[in-house]
Amino acid sequence: MPSDHIQGGFRKNTSGKRLSTMIMNDYLDLHRRASEGAFVVWIAIIVPAELFSGFENVVYGVPESHAALCAGKGAGPVLCEKAEGFGYSTDLCSYARIDIGTAFDGGKDSPTFGLPRPDLIISNNNNCSLLVKWFDVYHRAWGVPHLVLDIPFCYENQKDRDFRYIMDQFGTLISTIEEMSGQRFDRDKARESVRLSSEAMKEWKRFLGFAAHRPSGITAFDSFVQMAPILTSRGTQRLVDHYRLLADETEEQVKNGIFPVPDEKYRLLWDNIAPWHQLRKMSGRLAGLGANITSASYTYCIGALEGEYDPYEFDGNDPLAWLARLQNFSVCPHGLNLRRKAMKEVIERNAIDGVVFASNRSCKVYSLMQMDQMRYIREELGIPCVMIDVDHADVRKYSEEAAFTRLEALLEMIDA
Amino acid sequence: MKGFLDSLADLKSQGHTLVGCFPLYPPLELLHSFGLTPVVLWGLRQDITRLTRSDRHLQPYACGVARCLSEFVLSQGGEFLDAIFMYNACDTLRNLPEILQSGLEQDGSSLPLFRLHIPAVPINPPSASNYLEDQIWELTKELKKFTGRSFSGPAFLNSTVLYNQQRMLIGELEHLAATGRLGFADCADIVLSAGRMPVSDHIALMEHTIRDAANRTPGEPAARIMLSGILPPPAALLDVMEQAGLMVVANDLAAMRRSYGYLPAASSDPGAYYEDLYSNHHPCTTILPSADRRLEHIMKTARENTVQGFIFVGEKFCEYEYFEIPIIAQMLAAEGVRTLELEIGIDDTLNLDAHRTRIEAFAEMLRQETGRSRRDKDAV
Ligand code: SF4
Ligand code: SF4
């Protein structure tokens, strides 16, 4: 086996090492600039972070991303327990519990020491509205203003009316930051940041495209790990460079016959948030069975419009318009028909043999369409499917044996 | 009083065109002004005893409201309903329309669907109010197509007057319950029946009940409590509360006070009316911009009604409610109000023993505290 690959994914190559440094630097930089007086914003993942580049000295932290990092580093249960100790129900989203546990205990047990205290909190409600409730917790505890972007859910492609409504709200967001921080917004700087994001998304999709190769050049687990800087370095040249390097390296490996699951027999698709606490274990154990989860709805939606796969490219004009049009770049704000459309395309592109629906009680918005989605994939597309129970960040709610019993059953179905 | 299904069967046989509205706060007046009879699909737990259809579409961690609603629409919606209406009340409900439509399609049936996105931001900036108004007018066009009737300003005005009358009478009814002249279980039953009968019938029912109860002697509670949650707890638990001497002097229930607490100005203009209604709505955890007002409102209500205990009847898996409860409990505690948190899951209508014990213990604690504070006062 090539020395730079562990069976089942996890690159120990240049882009893998670069990723760790990049994330570490992003968090260090955030803490440093905050301590030096930058205006600190906490945002939900879909909030258009590129806009902050239009200001001289605005930095942002992403609680969801921080929670994912904590879960990946094994700190999920201890931080969830803290939140539960503060009275937050175990049924609440585990990202929220991890982050509340961190924030209300001064960042202890978080690998990044939490996030620096915000001056402004910005959430949106299209991924989920509970995020607004979650951010409200901080707003109340610390008296920090909380701005909500109201982004209508998409049962079909974004309507013109919705687009205009979102544009208006971006205006409010900008003027709020201007007023609070005393800094002026520079549209050209934001345009450049958007251009870089669009560029980075092209490279991201080039990287994901290697899932179409047989055997696949990547695993979905690679994409889970590699998506982190989209949230911490959005709209930067370093993000473009990183994804270019990642895609180039993957291309090189494919050319050289280096594959994460060389004896790949089963090509699977994952539907839901990454199982952050299981990345290594799950990918390794699946690889041992000749199975590779090559694609994931969680990562293939990034950078695309509703129900699409290809990146939505920036035309160089109004950066706000690009951001507004792309306000639904994750799966949760999509209705069933849009989810079906995108998944069908990926199943066909990447020659998927089976789909794993990770039913995740922590994220109801992602999960409460899966039974119908699964029926469609199985009955209309004839692709075997299985549903397993996974909490994306709280390992206490996951049973590896129960999950693998079902995963093995899926492989048998594919064989049948 | 008749249950949900029987009531709907009656309405159907009387020729009503029924629109099944997803909770929580649909624009009932607008539907009514088109000659439709809106019914609100919550409080179905007594009627929906099995979830066979819903379980084929929803995982068990969807809240009971959504599961019962889905079961009803999928198994009997075609029989009773002529259309469905939904708005973005919560994440779970927003995921449902296509699931239900695809479930109905699998059975070869379908129901027209009306949808609305109510801004989840303060509606005062023009962008949000224009957005809402735009949609309201679009909805009126869809309703025109559906009913064959044009929108009528006077008809809408008349509907808003009726619904305001309903809101006022519900206020009176809750006041009677708060003073012990009407059992809270009966009060809740009557208020909830609003979702399954024409507004004019509901008004008549309340007028009758109020006349009957008004002259009764007020009751003397052992302890004064405020109930919070989405739906009132099952009648059996309300009985336990009553037997334990707990009197519900105020409520923050979504299906009761939160639904009817604000009286918008009657109007012939639906855009202006709904802007007023949703901007100034009685605070609710699901009306996102009202969340800050909600905390103040609960504290104020607790003070004004000298509430001693706050019982939160959590609808299992309703995240909206659970995010707010720790801070509410904290704020109430700072004012000496005790909180009891109950969680009602879909199966809890059958197994209420654990809740019963906790309610009795809570009542005992409040009684002891009341006794202690009386003794302290006497000593002074
Ligand atoms: S519920 Fe889902 S979409 Fe919402 S914050 Fe949690 S993980 Fe994200
Ligand atoms: S109980 Fe909560 S989650 Fe369920 S439908 Fe109502 S608001 Fe939504």
Image (cartoon, coloured by chain):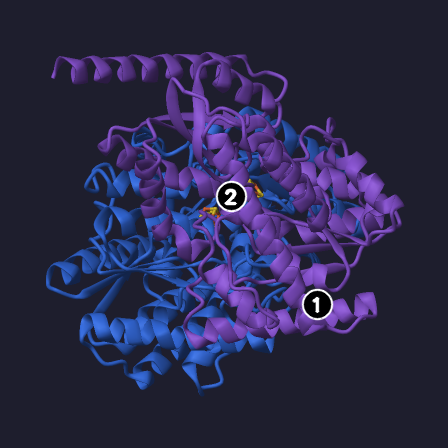
Pointer 1 residue? B155
Category of crowding for the residue at label 2, using alpha-carbon neighbours closer than 10 angstroms: few (below 14), some (14–19), many (at least 20): some
Q: Position of residue A330 (x, y in %)?
A: 52, 59
Which quadrant of the picture is home to ligand 2? top right
Q: In which chain is the residue bearing label 2?
A: B
* Chain that the image shows in purple: B
**Which residue is located at x 61 percent, y 44 percent?**
A368
Tell me if residue A86 can be seen: yes
Quadrant in which the N terminus of chain B is drawn: top right
Could you say which is closer to the camera, residue A411 or residue A231?
Answer: A231
Give the SS element for disc 1.
helix
Pointer 2 residue? B171
**Which residue is located at x 82 percent, y 54 percent?**
B17
Chain A on-screen colour: blue
Q: Amino acid at mark 2?
A: Gly
Is residue B96 shown above or below A350?
above
Quarter of the image where one finds residue A187 = bottom left
Q: Is mark 2 within 8 Å of ligand 2?
A: no
Q: Earlier in the sequence, mark 1 or mark 2?
A: 1
Q: In which chain is the residue bearing label 1?
A: B
Going by the image, does B201 lie left or right of A394?
A: right
Q: Position of residue A220 (x, y in %)?
A: 52, 50
Q: Residue furthest bottom?
A: A317
Tell me if residue B345 can be seen: no
Is residue B337 shown above or below A414?
above
